[in-house]
Image: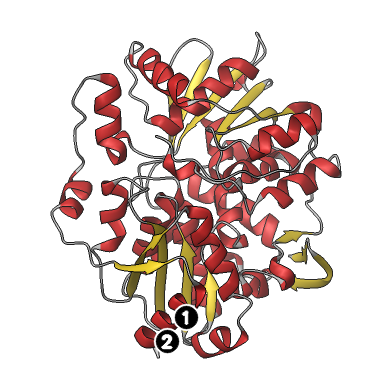
Amino acid sequence: MNLVNLKDKQQQVSFTEAVKTGLGRNQGVFFPTDLRKLSDVDALLDLPFVERSTEILAHLIGNELPKDTLADMVQRAFNFPVKLEKVDDKNYCLELFHGPTLAFKDFGGRFMAECVGLFNQGERVTILTATSGDTGAAVAHAFYKKANVDVVILYPEGKISLAQQKLFTTLGENIHCYAVDGSFDDCQALVKQAFLDEELKSKLGLNSANSINISRLVAQVCYYFEALAQLPKSERDNVHVSVPSGNFGNVCAAMIGSVIGLPIAKLSATTNQNDTVPRFVHSGDWAPKATMESLSNAMDVSKPNNWPRVQSMLGSEQFSKHDFYSRSVSEQVTEKVMREIAHTGYIAEPHTAIAFEGLRHDKGENSIGIFLATAHPAKFKESVENVLGQEIAMPRVLQDALDKSCLAQPLGADYQQLKAAMFEKLL
């Protein structure tokens, strides 16, 4: 797999190098130079999830990994189900929250952990990542107690749900967490600064587990194939997928799937009130505003790191601009849609409701719609209960985490503070 730095086209790397490097020169993200079509998608859709995912990843990555090694990695990483639930006659919900931390980030986090374990061959590595909610838990659990790996997680203090926070701030051991006095964008900026610091990179073996890491991105492609595999064959011809979008890695994976042959006819990247991309799509003006807090906090992102990858596919017409939609959903509408979906008997947390709202507006009359549920409703228990006026059952894994003490340390939104804290903790 050959990848190019989208900010510095002179930097081209293999999949292995991209996974180990994380972020390219000038803070550029890596992207494949050639996304070839799969030869027989219909046959692939007949395979079981793990076997099909191995074939898809082998196609994307190429011959860098032996097929049997890759199969073992996928088997260990994807050891939980993906469920497509029918909500009404024309719409389905793709539930991606049946993994160990009850969020879609488990797919990318666990596959990345497999890749890092294989590629670093005992060398020390420090994973530095920012989280707006679910990434922290997925990465922490994927790398928990892994030999020669330390994980440093930055999150915006008071701006993620308590359930999300407790899933990763209570682990300890090789998981080090910092509650940053600022927004997710501030956390993300600190991560980017760290990757420009050669001293920190060399002494700690720095890598990132944000969705900028290509291993997470390719893993996410697999569950879009599973979504269509679970659809009746008669409904696969005109599918419209709506993805709740914050950092835009998830919708990027859907687009990659389409480019290599998955019959997704149209895509919606639906955001909350942090609407940098919807405004850009409609006006051509890239003008990020200050990040606003919302019910859908995992999408409280004003400067999405994965947008250059999406823009690359749209700009090259690998995916048609005419089939790509992006709109924002207000807090009031989010609550309204949560109540409307509940009347069908389905419980949706805020991110899922936003995806459904985008689908409802963008989908053609004859299309089959799939909207993504990226997290279990109980991860947003308080807000879901407040909106719906009904109690949400708490899964055991969340209750166990809530009963534990938070081990995170406070940190200002200041890079020198972060560097000093990391050196003190890890050297």
Measuring 16% from the left and 52% from the top, which residue is drawn there?
400
Structural distance between the alpha carbons of marks 2 and 1: 6 Å
Image quarter for residue 381? Answer: top left
Residue 419 - label: 1
Q: Say left or right for 234 vs 349.
A: right
Q: Which mark is residue 379?
A: none
* For residue 283, above or below residue 4: above
Snapshot quadrant of residue 257: top right
Residue identifier under label 2: 423
Q: Position of residue 173 (x, y in %)?
A: 27, 76
Q: Quadrant of the N terminus?
A: bottom right
The secondary structure type at the circle numbered 1 is helix
Residue 23: give x, y in percent of width and height.
64, 69
Farthest residue toward the left? 403
Does residue 420 appear in this view? yes
The mark total stands at 2
Q: Is residue 37 visible?
A: no
**Image x and y of residue 114, in percent:** 47, 68
- On the picture, is 108 further left or further right than 387? right
Q: Residue at x 55, y 43 (%)?
A: 246
* Quarter the C terminus occupies: bottom left
Which residue is at the front of the view, 218 or 337?
A: 337
Amino acid marked by disc 2:
Phe
Residue 415 on image: x %, y %: 51, 74
For the residue pair 180 and 315, the one nearer the viewer reads as 180
**Labels 2 and 1 touching (C-beta < 8 A):** yes
Q: Is disc 2 placed on a helix, strand or loop?
A: helix
Q: Measuring 45% from the left and 26% from the top, which residue is drawn there?
A: 331
Q: Which residue is more in the foreground, 282 or 3?
A: 282
Q: Hey, what amino acid is under mark 1?
A: Lys
